[in-house]
Image (tube, helix red, strand yellow):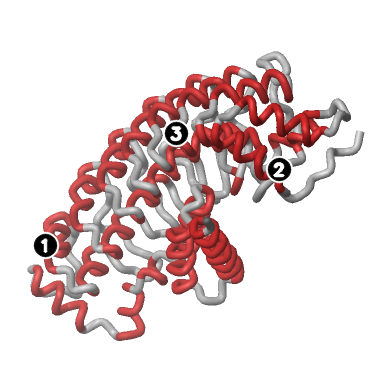
């Protein structure tokens, strides 16, 4: 059977979506019947109503309209735990209602949809599942609920696992839940960044503490750039203590041969050098083993070698990390932050076409979103 015809929302279609948003079941039934026109195919008529990819069930779920959700699920679409929402079901294709309910924080609606066959591991934008969304927004009760219904705690998406998302969004409470449920704290996202490196990038000290407590590998980096080298290049003074206590090697060198203390000195970070000096082995070419001696030593390094202190060179995969950050904000419809992330990534890698296209899309989405908010 051919899929139902999809058409833009006219007067009746807009009224149907408004009834779904308002939770007006009587009006919804009346409008749905009018849209069907006596054909006896109310399901097709309701499915065909879309605005920016969202249908009536998406709207009702995002507003927590339980009666309407129940009516559509049980009477129109006839989903049950035995006959769940299928991959082929057109109403579940673009943005599944479950993800809308999760984003809106409607716990009861999430519980209802899960009880009627909603798949907690169904990917939506950027290959993310509902648990990625719940974690990103710090909706801990929903995170627990999804996990209790079998959500994959290690589900890989374009922006990593839920643990990567918790790290990049500074959601330490959600991170603790994931760790308590056995998530892999050393998973690498496309062979680039571990959750620990992601947390360092996000400057999330609590997340770093949780990861270290869960036995995150403090020696695992990108190439030769270890977490301690990352911290030194970013000036994360408060993070050194925890990395060093967990076994980070202060003598490990970057791809360009710099130790963390040298990287800190190149940026003239006196306090960082003071912390790293007692735990760093003697540098043969440094005769004055003091903070000032180290700072004076790096001033003698040739310019072409000193340029390696630039984070773009020490951390060559940071543009990809900014891309993942922007993708996460796009998923959450926070288009302003998405633009900022993609722009930061483009500054590091101006020739990155993927980043440029993503920034263009984010700017367009931001424009549409603002226009919608200004509409009467």
Image location (x, y in percent) of residue 257: 34, 69
The alpha-carbon separation of the residues under discs 2 and 1 comes to: 67 Å
Q: Which numbered disc, 2 or 1, marks the residue that appears first in the sequence? A: 2
Label 3: few (<14), some or many (≥20) within 10 Å?
many
Who is closer to the viewer here, 240 or 116?
116
The residue tagged 3 is 105
Q: Considering the image in quadrants, where does the N terminus appear? A: top right
The alpha-carbon separation of the residues under discs 2 and 3 comes to: 26 Å
Quarter of the image for residue 273 reads bottom left
Residue at horizontal 84 percent and vertical 43 percent from the top: 5
In this view, 277 is above or below 40: below
Who is closer to the viewer here, 105 or 176?
105
Left or right, 264 with respect to 274, comes to: right
Secondary structure category for the residue under label 3 = loop
Image location (x, y in percent) of residue 59: 59, 38
The residue tagged 1 is 274
Q: Which mark is residue 112?
A: none
Residue at horizontal 78 percent and vertical 33 percent from the top: 34
In this view, 301 is above or below 58: below
The residue tagged 2 is 13
Quarter of the image for residue 359 reads bottom right
Label 1: few (<14), some or many (≥20) within 10 Å?
some
């Amino acid at each position: 059977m051919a899929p139902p015809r999809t058409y833009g929302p006219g007067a009746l279609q807009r009224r149907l979506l408004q009834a779904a948003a308002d939770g007006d079941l009587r009006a919804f039934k009346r409008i749905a019947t009018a849209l069907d026109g006596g054909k006896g195919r109310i399901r097709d008529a309701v499915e065909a109503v879309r605005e920016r990819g969202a249908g009536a069930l998406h709207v009702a779920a995002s507003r927590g309209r339980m009666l309407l959700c129940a009516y559509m699920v049980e009477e129109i679409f006839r989903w049950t735990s035995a006959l769940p929402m299928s991959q082929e079901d057109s109403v579940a294709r673009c943005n599944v209602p479950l993800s809308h309910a999760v984003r809106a924080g409607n716990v009861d609606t999430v519980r209802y949809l899960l009880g009627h066959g909603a798949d907690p591991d169904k990917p939506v934008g950027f290959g993310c599942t509902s648990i990625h969304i719940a974690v990103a927004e710090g909706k801990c009760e929903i995170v627990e609920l999804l996990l209790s219904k079998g959500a994959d705690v290690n589900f890989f998406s374009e922006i990593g696992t839920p643990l990567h998302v918790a790290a990049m969004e500074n959601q330490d409470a959600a991170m603790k839940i994931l760790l308590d449920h056995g998530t892999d704290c050393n998973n690498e996202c496309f062979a680039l960044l571990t959750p620990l490196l992601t947390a360092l990038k996000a400057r999330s000290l609590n997340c770093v503490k949780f990861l270290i407590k869960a036995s995150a590998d403090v020696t695992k980096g990108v190439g030769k750039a270890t977490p301690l080298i990352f911290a030194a290049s970013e000036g994360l003074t408060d993070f050194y203590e925890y990395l060093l206590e967990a076994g980070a090697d202060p003598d490990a060198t970057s791809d360009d041969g710099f130790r963390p203390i040298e990287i800190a000195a190149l940026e003239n970070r006196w306090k960082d050098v003071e912390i790293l000096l007692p735990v760093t082995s003697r540098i043969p070419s440094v005769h004055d083993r003091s903070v000032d001696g180290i700072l004076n030593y790096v001033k003698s390094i040739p310019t072409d070698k000193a340029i390696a202190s630039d984070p773009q060179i020490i951390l060559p995969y940071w543009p990809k990390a900014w891309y993942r950050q922007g993708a996460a904000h796009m998923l959450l419809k926070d288009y302003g932050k998405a633009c900022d992330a993609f722009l930061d990534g483009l500054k590091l890698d101006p020739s990155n076409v993927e980043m440029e296209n993503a920034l263009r899309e984010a700017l367009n989405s931001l424009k549409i979103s603002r226009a919608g908010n200004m509409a009467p």
